[in-house]
Amino acid sequence: MSTIEPLETKATAAAGLSVADQADVGRFWRDLRASVGSAVVGGEPALRLLAVAMLADGHALIEDVPGVGKTLLARAFARSLGLSFNRVQGTPDLLPTDVTGSSILEAGRLRFVPGPVFANVLLVDEINRATPRTQSALLEAMQERQVSIEGETRPLPAPFLVVATQNPVELEGTFSLPEAQLDRFLVRVTMGYPEREDERLIAHRYRGGTEPLERIEPIVDRDTLLALQRTASEIVVSEAVEGYMVDLVRATRQHADLRLGASPRTSVAIFRSSQAWAALAGRGFVLPDDVAAVVHPVMGHRLLLDVDRQLRGATIERVLTEVLGSVPVPVPVPVPKPER
Amino acid sequence: MTRAGLAFGVALVVAGVGLAAPGLVLIGLLDLFAVGVTELWSRFGLRDLHYERKIGRERAVWGDEVPLDIAVWNDKPLPIAWLSIDDYATQGAVVREEPLVRGERPGFTILRSRWTVGWYERVVRHLTIVADHRGVYSFGPVRVTVADLFGHGAATREHQDRGPYVVRPRSLPVRLASRQHAPAGYLRARQSLFEAPALFAGVRPYQAGDPMRRVHWRATARTGVTVSKRFDPSRALEVLVALDVQTLPGPHWTLQFDEELVEGLMVAAASLARHALAEGASCGLAAAAFNRTLDRFAIVPPRAGRDQLASIADMLARLSETPSAPFERLLARLPQTISAGTTVLVLTARDPEPYIAALARLDRSGYHVQLVALGPAADSVVARARAVGLTATIGSLTPDWRTSDALVLAS
């Protein structure tokens, strides 16, 4: 008598992963929600995208108006991970060496003092207030995962996640990140205003005067996180779903409202993010739904609208919705039975 | 009416029976039937009746056509023989297939639709909004009236279902007769002499005479040597388009204007802003015109973001055709909004005599004032500006702002 093996287990076996690996990812997500939720009210979609960025070994840009909890979310997330954490406040007089570190003269010898970039999680608050020079130094570190200072290349610790925040409204005295640099961020996260009940709860939490962040305890250690990243990178993506990803990316290049469509690097970003999204859902394989879920946060900041279309009310969100609606979703196809 | 009709019908029936007059009974029964029908539709006609309005997009550019779909869905087993929907629209809105009728409310016209809708029937009308006038428009509120089989108004309901849309002015490429007419490029060489305090470039050894605020204390502590901050020269250009909406001579409060010139100025302002932003400058807009806020001055501070042109175009869409204050008062307020070194592109179509002194003052106080004149008086306007030492160019939209393919700047 043969037993029917659950689909998930089959996919997992096909991927060469142990079931425990995926259970770990599922547990990680559950614990992370509970841990961050003790300090941050609402914001689960944003937290999920931060977790996607971490599992996919990318970086996240949190973009929203002031006061919605961008920094709090980033700090709570970092604290929950139990990794080394540093924070940099973007200001116009921030030097590249203030981020990367520099050598100081000590007893007649130069001693290297590492900058805040030498941490597992780096929070760059208001990144667009830093000058382009400092932004470049930081973004180079994000891409290369190493910094070269005074002729010496120093690797950054792994995992390395940059969570940057920026306010899209107050642009006076800021230096907008160019498209090429925005591309370095795997996902762009927006938080939005909380629901009425959530807002009441936020006010309630702060009534006691205690800092909600103090309640957060680390839920994982560094080695576990690295293992989770490996697990996420081995999630199975079928050929049909791969084709779907590529079709979505290519559709943006033909869209009339766009001046600049998505690059091949975007395909890679969609691939990795979908894997991480599926892993968080406790699956060993990627569904088209996972791809659709990450399209807006992964592609939104990589596209440029045509000026004339923008004046006619075109928005990136609408373009992506149209792209998602126009590209055929792969559906399961029954395998024909061999004729006897 | 219903109660009186009911009483009348009953009386007729009773009288007909009493007098043994079948004709009276018949008339009474017919009256009762009519009263019943009216009552039925007045009570249930509006129930489960839905109206939807879908505007294709909320932003359009002058000359565009925007799809407008209106749908009625009667979700009940009672057909509606006569349904009238009055959708109030801001005056000036144009729907190609259906002329809007004048309404009883000032400032509104009505998009009137009349239908017969069966039970569980959904009816859709596909219409087209013609964006033939710059401005901010909205549809709504909506008044829905149902009538009975005899066409008597049975019930009316009004709901606040607003659907706004904005018609932005055209923005055209700017064509320069020569490089010297470039509105933003004119300043590149002059501005690079200054340092931009926001562009922190690093540190250098302290030199005698460096102000204390220039010392970088953190770096000094780190290196053990006093160092001063070094800044990059200012490369970022800031351009503010100062739009003079007054087109006729005289005081600003006359409420008269030359529509062709006003719309031409709007197109020119949008075109200059688009050009400046494409050149990599930060660009803003200022005008002394009513703009649907309590502020008499419409100001969009200079910025270089992705959405800046859209913000400027939105502001231009909102501007009134007549000024809200004297233009010179706006010029006097500009230093509070823009930083020194900003290029102020003054766009005008009238003699600048009333504000020429304010322009010269602005130019002397560290702003780079450049005047762009439009319209038939452009030659004399330019001559007047040059007489006081200002840079001035003639802008032209040929043959007119509707059909021109570029804003040409020339001497």
Image (cartoon, rainbow, N blue to C red):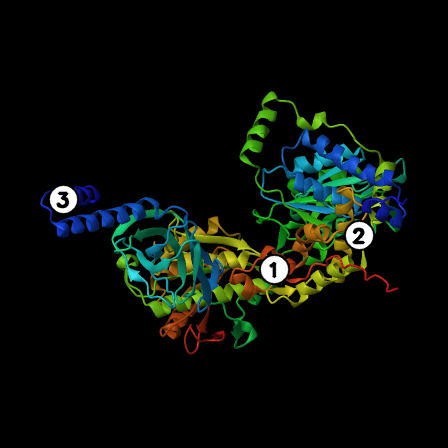
Task: Tell me which label, 1 or 2, sits earlier in the chain.
Answer: 2
Determine contact: label 2, label 3, CB under 8 Å.
no
Left or right: B304 as drawn, with respect to B27:
right
The residue pinned by badge 1 equals A322
The residue pinned by badge 2 equals A143
> Which amino acid type is marked by label 3?
Val
**On what subunit does the disc labeled 2 rest?**
A
Considering every residue shown, the one lying at the far left of the view is B19
Determine contact: label 3, label 1, CB under 8 Å.
no
The residue pinned by badge 3 equals B17
Q: Nearer the viewer, mark 3 or mark 1?
A: 3
The Cα–Cα distance between marks 3 and 1, rounded to whole angstroms, is 71 Å
* A277 w.r.t. B385: above or below: above
- Secondary structure of residue under mark 1: helix
> Which amino acid type is marked by label 2?
Gln
Q: Position of residue A315 (x, y in %)?
A: 57, 57
> Which amino acid type is marked by label 1?
Glu
Q: What crowding class fits label 3: few (fewer than 14 Cα within 10 Å), some (14-19), or many (20 or more)?
A: some
* Circles 2 and 3 on the same subunit: no
B324 and A149: which one is in front? B324
